[in-house]
Image (cartoon, rainbow, N blue to C red):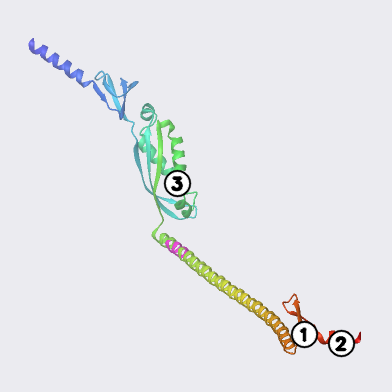
Amino acid sequence: METFTLIIIILVILFFFSGIRIVRPTHKLLVETLGKYIKTSEQGFHWVIPIIQSGKYINITERMVDVLPQMVITKDKLNAEVDAVVYYQIKDPKASLYNVDDHKSQLTSLARTTLRAVIGKMTLTDANENRDSINEKVETILDKETASYGVEVLRVELQKIEPPSDVQDSMNNVVKAEQEKIAATDFATAKEIQADGIKRAKIKEGEGQRQFSILEAEGKAQAFSLINKSFIGNAQLFKKYDVVERSLKENSKIILGDDTNGILKLFDLSKVTKSIKKK
């Protein structure tokens, strides 16, 4: 009897512990009773009835799905190998489990077809130059299409768009030629600017020399004019002084006073004598 009781106790303990479910913050627990959905349990301790009830854990953290490389024909009829990754998060655990068979594989397949559709409408050059635009378009389409999955597409990152090696070599040559053309144009522009600067410097230098010559000539002319005027005035003054000197020596003149030029006024005595005699 004691053995039977012990066995019952052990079975009860096992039964209890087999129904324990611990839900971490990164998951949610979907509880089913005889295959029918009952509730979604949050983080913490939970207990389900063994055999009758079951629980399925759903990861609600951000997850990544790798879209395997595939060949895509671009608008300009070129083959390009495309590779991308999609980041998503489950927002509705119930929908992600019951509305789609396998949301991860479904999302991967949908991402591949969406990439082909978006890049197929673009040339290879446009696709390489507008990767951000492609990411946004694919993300918008996937987020809309996977709404029924209970999944939210967070972002899409296009990892590579690689054409065949011969096309890549041709593109590299074109880019190299364009860069050389730009470099040559920049060099020619720099030389032209340098030559223009030298030309303007020469013109400025010539104008400066011409202006200096004009100013120098005008200065010399003004100086010559001043010297000439000074020479003539001094010569006239000297002549007046000479006349006065000779008149005084002959005792025929009388000094009366100064005129405006500083020359002494002389009175002729002989003319006075002649006047007296006539009277």
Which is in the foreground here, disc 3 or disc 2? Answer: 2
| Image disc number at residue 253 | 1
Q: What segment carries the magenta color?
A: 172-178
| Image disc number at residue 18 | none
Residue type at mark 1 is Lys
- Say whether disc 3 or disc 2 marks the residue closer to the N-terminus: 3
Q: Would you say 239 lies left or right of 146 here?
A: right
| Image disc number at residue 132 | 3
Residue type at mark 2 is Lys
Q: Position of residue 247 (x, y in %)?
A: 75, 87
Residue 175 magenta-highlighted: yes
- Say whether disc 2 or disc 1 marks the residue closer to the N-terminus: 1
* Dot 1 and dot 3 residues touching (CB under 8 Å): no
For residue 208, what is the image quadrant?
bottom right
Helix, strand or loop at disc 2?
helix
Which is in the foreground here, disc 1 or disc 3? Answer: 1
128 or 109, which is in the foreground?
128
CA distance for labels 1 and 3: 118 Å
Helix, strand or loop at disc 3?
helix
Q: Which residue lies furthest to the right in this view?
A: 279
For residue 156, what is the image quadrant?
top left
CA distance for labels 2 and 1: 14 Å
Q: How crowded is mark 2: few (under 14 residues within 10 Å), some or many (20 or more)?
A: few
- Say whether disc 1 or disc 3 marks the residue closer to the N-terminus: 3
Task: Give the main secondary structure of the magenta stretch.
Answer: helix
Q: Which residue lies furthest to the top in this view?
A: 1
Disc 2 target residue: 274
